Amino acid sequence: MTEDRYLGCLVGHAVGDATGAPVEGLDARLIYSQFGRAIEYVANPPVETLCYTDDTQMSIGVAEVLVEFGHIDEDALATTFGNNYDPDRGYGQGARRLLHAIRDGEDWREFARTLFPGGSYGNGAAMRVAPVALRFADDPERMMQEASASARATHTHEIAIDSARLMAAAVRYALRATSLDPQAFLEHLRDLATTDEFQWQLNTACKLPLEDSYVMFGTGLEAHRSVTTALMCFAMNPESYPDTIATAIGRGGDTDTIAAMAGGISGAYLGLDAVPQELRHRFERQAKDLEYISTLARKLYSASQ
Ligand code: 8NA
Ligand code: MG
Ligand code: MG
Ligand code: MG
């Protein structure tokens, strides 16, 4: 576990988010007809400046709390999400309401529980969990507990909590791997799944050829769909960051979030140099924001040693 992989993870996540964001919500056919093959889109995105969204903004909040407190303090996390909230970053509809409530000093625990029936099962808990994996990579049990805690500030549904645990486990696996067997990666995650939804998705992923199964899992905001798809995008392209995020973006739907999650895993495995310079260069106000994200990655690395 080198510092380079910590940097690769958080930078790969942020760049995946910002590269997928311009086409978030479009379907695969529309993306293909407008921009051609996804790998060409990734080589030359259609915007000069790549702006990051809620996925990165909330990951920064998780990393900040870990650096300051050494663990996930749920009250501090909710407060940090509220303080960092920027309406222009494109948050989920429920997340927006919850963040307003946090800022207004309402009881966020009660609000999160009643936001949707059973709480939110959106992918917002998984999209921001990578810093937890970096901080607790040496202690898998603790990492799973902290991942669950990081979800609960906004997402109380069991699917969302499982999604945060599984995404953390995926980042940890990639961070420590010296070579990557896609089947072993998916079986590791299948064995950790606790909800029926994830057990079904990951069982299917393990049983069928990757290229046949990855189109089955969906690209919507529901955590068990987009998170499984993100895992598959990495499993299909473990040796290439651009191919990983292109696979994520080319399927359409929640492109920023799937590319962020897959990109974070890919960067954790391949290291910082795998994230193309051209994309890093176009990343919004890169001097300031990428440097800040890199500083958080370095601090998580030091704290984890
Ligand atoms: P969330 O908690 O609002 O969940 C996302 C959505 O999932 C909700 O708005 C509901 O439509 C649906 N949902 C969640 N739980 C339930 C439930 N129990 N019953 C019925 N429906 C439910 O927000 P989040 O933080 O989980 O969302 C993350 C996503 O929001 C990411 O894709 C992120 O990029 C962002 N996002 C932004 C835009 C945008 O306008 N730029 C669009 C979509 C999503
Ligand atoms: Mg987003
Ligand atoms: Mg298989
Ligand atoms: Mg999204």
Image (tube, rainbow, N blue to C red):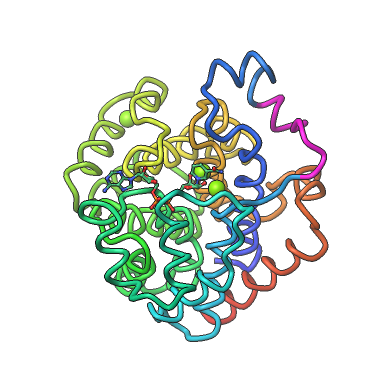
Say if 152 sits above or below 216 in the image.
Answer: below
Q: Quadrant of residue 102?
A: bottom left
Say if 61 sits above or below 46 in the image.
Answer: below
Give how far across and how far down residue 19 sits, in percent.
66, 40
**Quadrant of the drawing holding the N terminus:** bottom right
Say if 236 sits above or below 88 in the image.
Answer: above
Give how far across and how far down residue 10 sits, in percent.
60, 59
Q: Nearer the viewer, residue 121 or 269?
A: 121
- Judge whether residue 43 is colored magenta: yes
Q: Which residues are magenta?
A: 39-49
> In the figure, is residue 254 to the left or right of 53?
left
Residue 288 shows in the view: yes
Q: Nearer the viewer, residue 72 or 270?
A: 72
Q: List the single residue furthest toward the bottom.
A: 69
Residue visible at 62% across and 17% down? 32
Give how far across and how far down residue 89 sits, in percent.
61, 53
Give how far across and how far down residue 41 sits, in percent.
70, 27
- Judge whether residue 239 is colored magenta: no
